[in-house]
Image: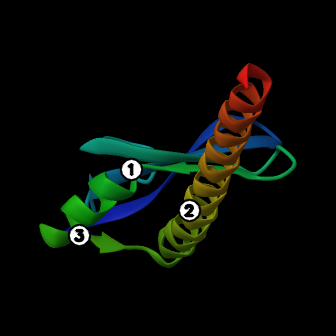
Amino acid sequence: MVKIRLRRDGAKKAPFYTLVVADSKYPMDGRFIEKVGTYNPMTSPKEIKVDLEKVKEWMSKGAKLTETAKSLVAKAEKQSTVEVKEAKEVKEVKAESKTKVKTASKVKEV
């Protein structure tokens, strides 16, 4: 059975985790099929980077998420939706400022 799980990297008392797709028979820190993300609990705020498209692709192929991986993927999805909303707001503000600059330049020309 293929699972999406955490692989511990890093040093003693300085953990760093990699989200990997691996056969459940492989050891926890052993061989894996593909790397799909990282998790660094030592930074503030905790850094979570997950390739959600790859995770969904593997899940469609039958891979199962472990409990910890499931919570990290959920946090990453929540984080990505917030980033998308912020990006849209930034684009809207830039668009508004460009229109203001255009109207201001038209006023100066007249």
Q: Return the residue found at the far front.
A: 110
Left or right: 29 as drawn, with respect to 102: left
Q: Quadrant of the N terminus?
A: bottom left
The crowding category of the residue bearing disc 3, from other C-alpha atoms within 10 Å (few below 14, some 14 to 19, many at least 20), is some
**Residue drawn at x 28%, y 53% as measured from the top left:** 54
Q: Visible in this render: residue 94? A: yes
- The disc label shown at residue 101, or none: none
Sequence-earlier tag: 1 or 2: 1
Q: Quadrant of the C terminus?
A: top right
Which residue is label 2 attached to? 76
Which residue is label 3 attached to? 59
In the structure shown, which secondary structural element does the residue marked by tag 3 occupy?
helix
In the image, 87 versus 60, the foreground residue is 87
In the structure shown, which secondary structural element does the residue marked by tag 1 occupy?
strand
- Inter-mark Cα distance, 1 to 2: 15 Å
- Inter-mark Cα distance, 1 to 3: 12 Å
- The x and y percentages for residue 44 are 87, 48
**Residue drawn at x 40%, y 49% as measured from the top left:** 51
Three-letter amino acid code at the position of disc 3: Met
Three-letter amino acid code at the position of disc 1: Val
- The disc label shown at residue 20, or none: 1
In the image, 91 versus 80, the foreground residue is 91
Q: Visible in this render: residue 32? A: no
**Residue drawn at x 68%, y 47% as measured from the top left:** 96
Sequence-earlier tag: 1 or 3: 1
Q: Return the residue found at the far left.
A: 61
